[in-house]
Amino acid sequence: MNRKQLWKLLSGLGLAFGVPWFLMILIPYFQQATASPVPYSEEEGVDGFTVYPDPSYGTVGASDYGLKIYEREGCAYCHTQVVRPTYAGPDMWLGWGGGPETARETRPQDFAGEAFAHLGYQRIGQDLSNVGTRSTREELHRVLSDPGSVSTGSAMPSYRHLYRKTDSGWAPTGDAEALVDYLLSRKKDQPLPDSVR
């Protein structure tokens, strides 16, 4: 191979990888990096909110520490946090979009303020975008400590190491409570301003 052929090959490879990287990674990154909260208009009359996304919406107890437990335990390997559009999957029909009045698909702005968007790697378990609107603290503790008791044949492993044995059964440790706080804070159903729809 002579220099001219090598130059063509390297130029072709550079274009083949550089253009998609620029279009699919670099441009969206800078668009999202400069995104700021969108104010609601006076006519919209959204109670309790002034901007979308509201950074304090959904914060529960030790949910910041619970995020670290979520990452440490590898929950994102089996659970996603993205409610797909109806043309791409049955997420809305499964009730994963939030409450009956506020159900909607996930928007890029839902991840504003998060250092890392935990989209998930694959969906073996249910989507956790709005698990805080679908589950109670007790239900989440039961699922974490003994998933098979909630769903027969569940592929989810037990996280009983986050609990301690007591005379009456299993009691949650601080890590288990923090993880449940984080899961209860997963509510991506804040109403959208008209300017975002």
Image: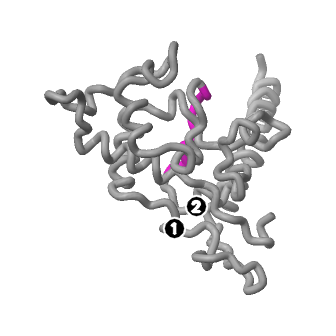
Question: Which is nearer the eye, 169 or 186?
Answer: 169
Discs 2/1, front: 1
Hey, which residue is sitting farthest front in the picture? 168
Q: Amino acid at mark 1?
A: Pro
Secondary structure, mark 2, is: loop
Crowding around mark 1 (Cα neighbors within 10 Å: few <14, some 14 to 19, many 20+) is some
Secondary structure, mark 1, is: loop
Question: Which is nearer the eye, 144 or 118?
Answer: 144
Q: Amino acid at mark 2?
A: Ala
In magenta, the rendered stretch is 116-123
Q: What x and y, as percent, mark residue 110?
A: 62, 57
Q: Measuring 47% from the left and 25% from the top, which residue is drawn there?
A: 150
Q: Measuring 59% from the left and 32% from the top, which residue is drawn there?
A: 126
Q: Measuring 55% from the left and 48% from the top, which residue is drawn there?
A: 117
Q: Is residue 131 above or below residue 100?
A: above
Q: Quadrant of the C terminus?
A: bottom right
Question: Which is nearer the eye, 102 or 16?
Answer: 102
Q: Quadrant of the N terminus?
A: top right
Q: Is residue 60 above or below residue 149?
A: below
Q: Where is mark 1, residue-wise?
A: 55
| Numbered mark located on residue 112 in the image | 2
